[in-house]
Image (tube, rainbow, N blue to C red):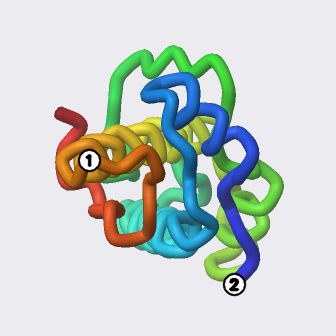
Amino acid sequence: MESLIVISKVKKFIKEKADMNTSAGFFEPLNQDIVKACRDALAHAQKLGRKTVMGKDFNLYVENSNIEEALVVASKVKKLIKDEAGLSTSSQAIDQLTVRVQAACNKAIENAKADKRKTVMDRDFTAPTSLT
């Protein structure tokens, strides 16, 4: 599966947030989670009979997310949704996926710190179920 996340920006996010490094293995489970989130959102949009996946189709919706920099590749997310369901994708969807990536990174940082490591690894990944 092609990566939907911008690896360099996710590394930068973790570095700036916690002054930690990121192992290469961290990105695969994160990417798989984003793919699943996209598929769940497109299923939700289809269930409601819409032709566009919107931000509110994602299970961790944040009103007024105010994202400075997207951590997912918008063109690849839009292609996945178009190829799998023929739906369009709103710009809010990219913001909601970035919120999800940030939440996963924040939890992974906590897990790495709890293990007294300076590197975020694949074993630190937990799919976000809430944003707190």
**Residue drawn where x is 62% and y is 77% of the image:** 85
| Residue placed under numbered mark 2 in the picture | 1
Q: Residue at x 78, y 67 (%)?
A: 79
Numbered disc in front, either 1 or 2: 1
Point out the image quarter for the C terminus: top left
Q: Is residue 46 visible?
A: no
35 shown above or below 128? below
The residue indicated by pointer 1 is 116
Secondary structure beneath dot 1 equals loop
Q: CA distance from mark 1 to mark 2?
A: 32 Å
Q: Nearer the viewer, residue 114 or 94?
A: 114
Residue 62 in view of the camera: yes
Decide if residue 33 is on the left or right side of residue 85.
Answer: left
Q: Depth check: 130 or 120 in front?
A: 120
Query: Where 84 sits versus 90, above or below?
Result: below
The three-letter amino acid code for the residue at tag 1 is Lys
Q: Quadrant of residue 103?
A: top left
Query: At numbered mark 2, what does the secondary structure look like: helix, strand or loop?
Result: loop
Is 80 in front, or is 123? Answer: 123
> Residue 6 at x, y = what percent?
72, 50
Q: How many labels were placed on the picture? A: 2
Q: Quadrant of the N terminus?
A: bottom right
Q: Residue at x 47, y 73 (%)?
A: 29
| Rendered location of residue 56, percent (x, y) | 38, 41
The image position of residue 106, as x and y in percent, is 34, 38
Q: Which class describes the residues within 10 Å of circle 2: few (<14), some (14-19), or many (20+)?
A: few
Instruction: Identify the amino acid type marked 2.
Output: Met
Sequence-wise, which precedes: disc 1 or disc 2? 2
Whether the residues at callouts 1 and 2 have beta carbons within 8 Å, the answer is: no
Question: Looking at the rendering, which quadrant does residue 12 occupy?
Answer: top right
Q: Position of residue 36 (x, y in %)?
A: 44, 73
Where residue 99 is drawn, which disc sits there? none
